[in-house]
Image (cartoon, helix red, strand yellow):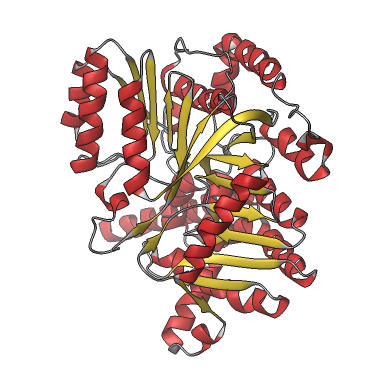
Amino acid sequence: MIDVIILEIIGLVGMGLHLLGLLTSVHAVMTSRTSQGAIAWALFLILFPYAGLPAYLMFGRGKFQGYVKARRAGDSQIDHLARALEKKMRLFRVREGEEHPRANPKYFALEELAEMPFTSHNDATLLVDGARAFPAIFAGLEQAQKYIIVQFYIIRDDALGQQMREILTRKAHEGVRVYVLYDEIGCYYLPLAYRQSLTEAGVAIVPFRTSRGLRNRFQINFRNHRKIVVIDGKAAYVGGLNVGDEYMGRDPRFGPWRDTHVEVRGPVVSAIQFAFLEDWYWATGDVPDLEWTPSPAPGENETALCLASDPSDTLESCGLLFMHAINSAQHRLWIASPYFVPDEALISALQLAAIRGVDVRIMLPQKPDHKLVYLAAFSYIAETEPAGVKFYRYQPGFMHHKVIVVDDDLATIGTANFDNRSIRLNFEITLLFADRSFAREVREMLEEDFANCRQTTSADLTSRSFLFRLAVSLARLLAPIL
């Protein structure tokens, strides 16, 4: 009798879960940002509700809940800062003796996406690899007089992380205000002792917790992927490097680590700082006292724009940036990204760009660090190759930088990968330079990288084993949720 009751209870629970899975699949269909994602979640929830329901609870949200609401709830100060900053930035819009980029339709939409103008009188310096980037960043930290902003997706307690901690501790003891913001998932293994030592030194260090608040406690699929350092509101560092020894090429698994950061001075620094401010406000509810008067870089006149994108955006700013770059290219479109999992719209845009004669090149790493993403990328080669899109695999080590060159007058460097996660789930930041001189530097940097690549074709997939090709096809099915 007891066995029958237990079986009935199990049956009722199973029916309840399947019913709940069916109802949740309706929510997925109504709220997913892509049709592929909606179909994938609906099937998963209906067929496997036991695993699908908890997975959807943690990973199914397409919009970051609470960020905009928190910003609007008590941030009249932030709104005031945003409006005042935009007015100040517009003082640097017109480049002396030249037509402002906004007059060119290629750039008009970019300002609308960024909600900030292109500004002139900036100075940008390429920092190729960690061997150049971190000495420059640490030198900037040492020069700080008023405050330091540090925001990274990953901070490790290794040789590089300890070096940064020592500098921040020393500067805090000197009276410099230090703000450190880290992603709660990316820094999951950062020891409590590391954070406590900074706190004891007077450093304000807090996590960016996407799961903050009762309603958001399972909201863990979003990541704050930004990497930002700002010194006194005058200099900033942005790019693909996190704080860890592997980013210096010290991990034997990956070998030399290929990455790119950029150091900027000038008005664009204020826009970078504002992206940090919004994240800091979400994490703390506090608005720190920062410098909000944009200042020109002496003797320099490069035109730059900061585009901060996140999953609370009304529009998919990151995806629209990629789409705009592809559609505006006339003769060159070079993309370097460690993760290449675009949606169908971006694939079609790449095909059309190649068909109209644009030199479309995609640089990917030869060595994978995320197997599913690595496998999924193979599936796009055969799809785009007939149109003329060319793929290259970087050979010497792991390639991690996120760089785009469009024609001869636009280059982007930032934190966003060419994948669904960066487009729809991550907080990212991208710097755009509408400057022929800087774009040439970036193009020449990528030319050296392409010289260290092997071009890969659809034959590289068809020549592999059946099991490998099956794994590629299965990974492609998961592309909408990777």
**Is residue 223 depicted above or below 50 in this figure?**
above
Inspect this view and state whether residue 27 appears: no
Q: Where is residue 37 in the image (x, y as percent from the top left)?
A: 60, 57
Number of callouts in the render?
A: 0
Question: Which residue is at the front of the view, 379 or 27?
Answer: 379
Q: Which residue is drawn at 42% across and 41% down?
A: 220
Residue farthest along the front direction in this orientation: 299
Q: Where is residue 256 in the image (x, y as percent from the top left)?
A: 31, 61
Q: In the image, 227: left or right of 350? A: left
Question: Which residue is at the front of the view, 460 or 72?
Answer: 460
Q: Where is residue 56 in the image (x, y as percent from the top left)?
A: 49, 49
Q: Residue at x 77, y 70 (%)?
A: 357
Q: Where is residue 118 in the image (x, y as percent from the top left)?
A: 69, 32
Quarter of the image where one finds residue 39: bottom right
Q: In the image, 170: left or right of 321? A: left
Q: In the image, 213: left or right of 306? A: left
Question: Which residue is at the front of the view, 131 or 283?
Answer: 131
Q: In which quarter of the image is the N terminus?
A: bottom left
**Is residue 146 depicted above or below 462 in this figure?**
above
Quarter of the image where one finds residue 149: top left
Q: Residue at x 45, y 87 (%)?
A: 464
**Is residue 116 depicted above or below 25 in this figure?**
above
**Is residue 461 depicted above or below 412 in this figure?**
below
